[in-house]
Image (spheres, helix red, strand yellow):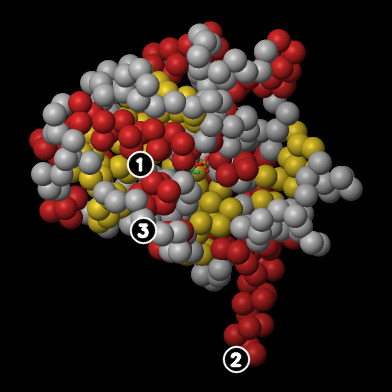
Amino acid sequence: MTSSLLPTYARYPLAFARGEGVWLETAEGERYLDLGGGIAVASLGYSHPHLVEALTVQAGQLWHTSNLFEIPQAERLASRLVAASFADTVFFANSGAEAMEGAIKAARKYHAAGGHPERFRIGTFTGAFHGRTYATIAAGGNDRYIEGFGPKAPGFDRVAFGDLAAVEAAITAETAAVLVEPIQGEGGIRMPPDGFLQGLRALCDARGLLLIFDEVQTGVGRTGALFACEHWGVSPDIMAVAKGIGGGFPLGAFLATREAGRGMGVGTHGTTYGGNPLATAVGNAVLDVVLADGFIAEVAAKGEHLRERLEGLAVDYPDIVAEVRGLGLMAGLQLRVSPAEFAAAGRAAHVLVIPAGDNVVRLLPPLVITPAEIDEGVRRLGQACRALSATVADRRAAE
Ligand SMILES: *Cc1c(COP(=O)(O)O)cnc(C)c1O
């Protein structure tokens, strides 16, 4: 099909017309079990009645006013995020990359406000992903995303993910902060080594650096905690969130302690749409569900169930699945075939998964998935593995 869209994506020849819970349906009525959740965005699945209600009620009242005015929905969402986290203050944006841009600017401004504008460099990690804007591609450090776009934004010093000694060695008098995803998402569901996040916190405290967590993918209940960093008992100074917080409506935010936000006074940063009444009404509705008693504990329990099932898959298909990774409902299968080939076999079995780096496919299902739907999803992944096993065997025989 010829498309008028800029061809920056190699799209699958598949379109959906409606969705309900964890299921997506084509116009022809073919149903797919979505273990990708629109890349961790559809945290409450599709057509969640509480989100539909919140959106349609707000849509009938007021969509947008601009940040020149008070926005009660944004005030409420910010104070709920503050009450539930390390943070004292919140800035709303429309995406993960914008949330990250704000986080980077706040970290630099913190030092400028303290009389050290020369401290602008930020320590980052191999395998990281922080978005596709000019600063965030430099922070992510993936050459495929950087090349050809002119000089890359300066001030990002990359070391191996998990290597605390390398971080320490890379710190100079110009270093402002360290930026890390508690669990790397797009990089391939890479878990932090034991003691790594605690070590980063101690290092940042000892050297007067801010610690920035990118929880755009891991946040808002995904890992079986409201924020993934809680699993390690570590709080950042600044945190970016997006994806799951809007449940499909574009919404991002950066959260900060009072101290870390000290440079960000009137006029230092802005956005036309960020935190508008429509977006933050939906964000509040997401929190109504995610913060309800027992919801996150249930995500943790379902995460363990998923893990067990995936371990079973790895045992049944050792020629396809090399390793199971992740935490909560953020899981990865490291493969012995290509992630694209695996995802295609999944689509043939009507189950959706998402390729990532490190030869991994990601499973980021809606947090409302039931244990029975997990079983059905993994059964379909087994079907995909069986088909791939046969293909791999044929390929070997032909060699
Ligand atoms: C998706 C993602 C981003 C970028 O979010 P966008 O909404 O696509 O701009 C940033 N950081 C992480 C960890 C992500 O997973």
- 18 or 233, nearer to the observer: 18
Mark sitting earlier along the chain (1/3): 3
> Which residue type does callout 1 highlight?
Pro
Say which label, 2 or 1, has the lower sequence index: 1
Q: Position of residue 187 (x, y in %)?
A: 43, 54
- Badge 1 crowding class, 10 Å Cα cut-off, few under 14, some 14 to 19, many 20 or more, is many
Between 143 and 159, the residue placed more toward the observer is 143
Secondary structure beneath dot 2 equals: loop
Q: Earlier in the sequence, mark 3 or mark 2?
A: 3
Depth-wise, is mark 1 or mark 3 nearer the camera?
3
Q: Position of residue 318 (x, y in %)?
A: 52, 67
Q: Which residue is mark 1?
A: 182
Residue 258 in view here: yes
Q: Which residue is mark 3?
A: 151
**Residue at image location 69% in from the left, 19% down from the top:** 55
Contact between labelled residues 2 and 3, with CB atoms less than 8 Å apart: no
How many numbered marks appear? Answer: 3
